[in-house]
Image: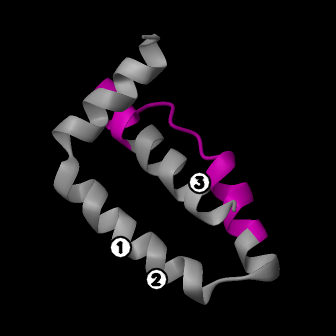
């Protein structure tokens, strides 16, 4: 397992409820956003800077961003 995969797995295990909520929000967002708005959101999430936050927050934020991008980029 790579460090990135381990960090992702830890984020999932520690924040299962938060990730379930995110999943529901992403489903709603996915059905209501399209075209240019979707592209702008994907671009913004892709370039979000996580510098200056704790390692635990960075792991969680990275997992949330990854899931959001997967949901929006299909």
Residue sitting at x 75%, y 68%: 40
What segment is highlighted magenta in the picture?
Answer: 39-60
Residue 23 on the magenta span: no
Between 63 and 44, the one nearer to me in the picture: 63
The residue that label 3 is drawn on is: 70
Q: Would you name the residue on which mark 2 appears?
A: 28
* Image quarter hosting the N terminus: top left
Task: Decide if residue 10 is on the left or right side of residue 26.
Answer: left
Q: Rounded to the nearest whole Å, what is the CA distance between mark 1 and mark 2? A: 6 Å
CB contact under 8 Å: marks 2 and 3: no
Residue 54 shows in the view:
no
Distance from label 1 to label 3 (Cα)?
Answer: 14 Å
x 52%, y 79%: residue = 29
What secondary structure predominates along the stretch shown in magenta? helix
Q: Residue 5 at x, y = what percent?
A: 43, 22
Q: For mark 1, does the 10 Å Cα neighbourhood hold few (<14), some (14 to 19), or many (20 or more) residues? A: few
- Residue 18 visible at all: yes
Q: Alpha carbon of mark 2 to alpha carbon of mark 3: how far?
A: 14 Å
Query: Mark 1 and 2 residues: CB-CB less than 8 Å, in contact?
Result: yes
Q: Is residue 48 left or right of residue 26?
A: right
Image location (x, y in percent) of residue 14 = 17, 38
| Label 2 neighbour load within 10 Å: few <14, some 14-19, many 20+ | few
* Labels 2 and 3: the sequence-earlier one: 2
């Amino acid at each position: 397992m790579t460090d990135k995969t381990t960090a992702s797995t830890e984020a999932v295990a520690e924040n299962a409820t938060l990730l379930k909520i995110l999943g529901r929000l992403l489903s709603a967002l996915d059905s209501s956003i399209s075209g240019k708005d979707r592209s702008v959101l994907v671009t913004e999430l892709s370039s979000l800077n996580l510098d200056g936050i704790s390692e635990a927050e960075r792991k969680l934020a990275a997992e949330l961003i990854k899931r959001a991008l997967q949901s929006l980029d299909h």
